[in-house]
Amino acid sequence: MKVLFVGDDWVGSNARSLADGFRQAGHEVVVIDTTSVTLPARLSPPWVYSKLAHRRAPWDVEALHREIEAAAREFAPDMLFAFKAVHLDQRRLLSAPAGLHVHYSPDDVSNPYNTSPEYLAHEPEWDLIVTTKSHNVAELAARGVRNVKFVRSAYDPALHYPVARRGVRRYLVGFIGAVRPDRQGLLIELAREHRGDMLLRGPGWRRVRPLWRTGADIGGAVYGEHFSAAIAAVTANLVLLNSDNRDTHTCRTFEVPAAGGLFVGERTDEHAELLQDEAECFLFSGPAELRDILRRCGRHPDQVAKVAEAGHRRIAAEGHRYVDRAREIVDALA
């Protein structure tokens, strides 16, 4: 197929990895980068406008749509694939010349934060809606969507793979991900308990004042090989879910074991299906069980290494790359 892929194209973006997945699956792919609209540079005029008007800068949206439409006319795609394009002009996306129009959402599409009124008004017009949340399937059908495809999140072997440690320091526990109210309290408590034996990476953690005197190693977002290097430095890599998305798995579900890290995650049916507890990962249902796991990790590092290796083999062997998800989506169209 000829695929016109509309999505963010920065290094580490899930959209870029999925676009490459379509290419690896044998399709001809042209990417239109939406980053100027979705992530305008801090303090730039579009950023200031978005903060004041609570919507994307219309001049940037217009320029992006002109680029999409010009590419569609010249490329004549079999499919226009839009990666979380809820803040773009839905009528113009759906009118762009293409054989099929497919929308992909990596987040809960029943959470208002992940939609827009215009997107919802046009949602049933897409030929296929792809969601990574199994609970969205029935909800989308109830909203009048004709075709829905559930695919799990994935990992990118070009970014997520075992690497050598960058330094001799090793942390007992670590988490890579953004600050969220549903996880902040637990991570502050763990930082106070483990101090210099804890690593935190992700947007917002440096601004959390209670962390400042804990001694935990706190840094910003890490992507690509830097993500895998951070995983390599940690014994127990936490996989925490987003309650606003009603997550039962997340990208980290695949990225952590793909990078060779020990998966220590919240107990859900999907996690239990993907990895065997105690043999390929460690699952917990609350802080007390998590603390027990961390004590065991500290006392039995050889056992921990074997569990991490088994988890890596399982995820790598069972088709959880972005190219595998691209094939699932194309199969659904067939």
Image (cartoon, rainbow, N blue to C red):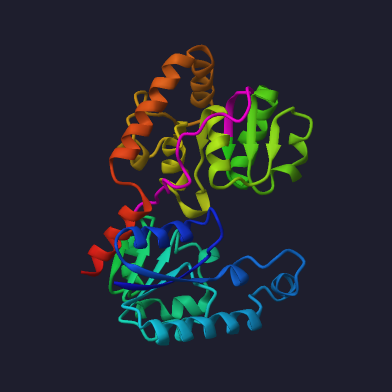
**Which residue is found at the position 67% from the left and 34% from the top?**
188
The answer to whether 156 is drawn above or below residue 302 in the figure is: below
x, y (%) of residue 157? 41, 45
Q: Name the one closer to the observer, 20 or 7.
A: 20
Count of labels in the image: 0
- Please identify the quadrant where the N terminus is shown: bottom left
Res 255 seen here: yes
* Side of 143 where 161 appears, left or right: right
The answer to whether residue 156 is left or right of residue 43 is: left
- In this rendering, the answer to whether 94 lies above or below 313 is below
* Magenta highlight on residue 168: yes
Q: What x and y, as percent, mark residue 298?
A: 54, 16
Find the magenta span and give its range.
150-174
Figure check: 19 above or below 267: below
What secondary structure is the stretch in magenta mostly built from? loop
282 sits left or right of 51 in the view: left
Q: Residue at x 34, y 34 (%)?
A: 275
Q: Quadrant of residue 45?
A: bottom right
Across and down, in percent, residue 167 comes to: 63, 26
Q: Which one is in front, 205 or 160?
A: 160
Which quadrant holds residue 220? Answer: top right
Across and down, in percent, residue 235 comes to 53, 25
Image quarter (top left, top right, bottom left or bottom right) of the C terminus:
bottom left
Residue at the spot 55% in from the left edge and 55% down from the top edge: 11
